[in-house]
Image (spheres, helix red, strand yellow):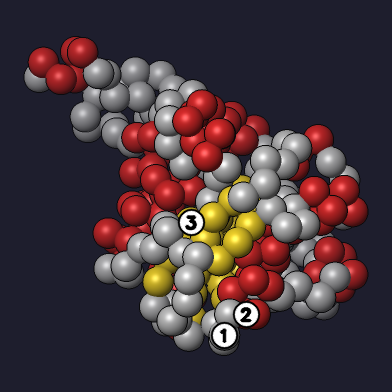
Amino acid sequence: MKLLDILYPKRCALCDRVISRREYPVCLKCRKEIRPIEEPRCMHCSKPLSSDGEELCPDCKRHKFSYDCGFAAFLYRGKMKNSLMRFKYGGRQEYREFYGEMLNLFAAEKVRRWSPEVLIPVPVHPGKLRQRGYNQAEVLARKLGEVWDIPLDSQCMKRIKKTRAQKDLDDKERRKNLRHAFSVVGDVDYRSVLIVDDIYTTGSTVDALAKLLKEKGVEEVYFVTVCIGKGM
C-alpha cells in the first residue's frame, strides 16, 4: 500500500467506506445499488415520468423555464443524497471522479448533441465559499471539462446576494429568494452554454442563471446535474 493511501485513504463515493484502489471510486457492494433514472423522462428537465404517454413533468407543465433542456443522472434520495451532502459540506471533493464517470456514461450523447462552447458552474456566495473552502459545482465542472474537453468559465457569473438555503423553501419562495441573487460579469460571448450543478430540485437556480445569460445574448442554455428531485 502506498504512503498516500495510508495517510489519505480512498473512500467509496456512496457509502464512504475506506476501499482499495481496485474498487475506487465505488465499492463492489454499492456498485450493485447504482440505479440511474430510467425512461420515461421529462423531455425538458429529465425528471422521471409516471407513464410513457407523458412528455413533460408537472413542474415543466406549470412553469416556462428559461433554459432549453437538461439532464440529471440520479434521483436525489438514499445513498446518492447522502453522497452529495458529503461532497458539498464534508470535504469529499474526490467524489467528483465517480460523478464525472456517471455523467459521462449517461449524459455524453446529449452533451454532444447540445454542443456547448463552455461549462459554467453555479456560483456560490463569497461568504459560503470561504466557509466551505470550495464550490462543489466548480469542482464537478472541472472534472467534466476534462472528460468532455470543454472549457470552463467560473468567472462570468457571480452570486452577489447571500440567500437562504433553498432546501428550506417551497417553489414560490425559492424563486423570490433568488431574485437579484446573481449577476453576469462583463460580456458573455457564447452562443451555447452548459450550466453544471450537483442538484436540481425545482429548477429555480438554473432558471435564474439561464434568464440572465439569455438577456446577455446567449442563444442556448442547457444544464447537467448529478441528481434531481422528483418534483410534484
Q: What residue type is labelled 1?
A: Gly
Provide residue 187's location: percent of width, then percent of height.
Answer: 47, 76
Q: Quadrant of the C terminus?
A: bottom right
Residue toward you, 168 or 52: 168
Residue toward you, 216 or 201: 216
Q: Are marks 2 and 3 in contact (CB under 8 Å)?
A: no
Circle 3 is placed at which residue position?
A: 121
Res 76 visible: yes
User: Distance of mark 3 from mark 1, alpha carbons?
Assistant: 18 Å
Q: Could you classify mark 3 by the number of other residues whose Cα lies within 10 Å: few (under 14), some (14-19), or many (20 or more)? A: many
Which mark, residue 50?
none
Q: Does dot 2 land on a helix, a strand or a loop?
A: helix
What residue occupies the far top of the structure in this picture? 6
Q: Answer above or below: position of 3 versus 219.
A: above
Circle 1 is placed at which residue position?
A: 217
- Say whether disc 3 or disc 1 marks the residue closer to the N-terminus: 3
Q: Answer above or below: position of 172 versus 52.
A: above
Q: Which amino acid does label 2 sit on?
A: Lys
**Residue in the image at 89% along x and 53% along y:** 172
Q: Answer above or below: position of 14 versus 55.
A: above
Provide residue 161's location: percent of width, then percent of height.
Answer: 67, 46
Residue toward you, 81 or 188: 188
Q: Does dot 3 land on a helix, a strand or a loop?
A: strand
Circle 2 is placed at which residue position?
A: 214
Q: Answer above or below: position of 110 versus 86.
A: below
**Residue in the image at 39% along x and 78% along y:** 117
User: Distance of mark 2 from mark 3, alpha carbons?
Assistant: 16 Å
Q: Do the residues labelled 2 and 1 touch (CB within 8 Å)?
A: yes
Q: What residue type is labelled 3?
A: Pro
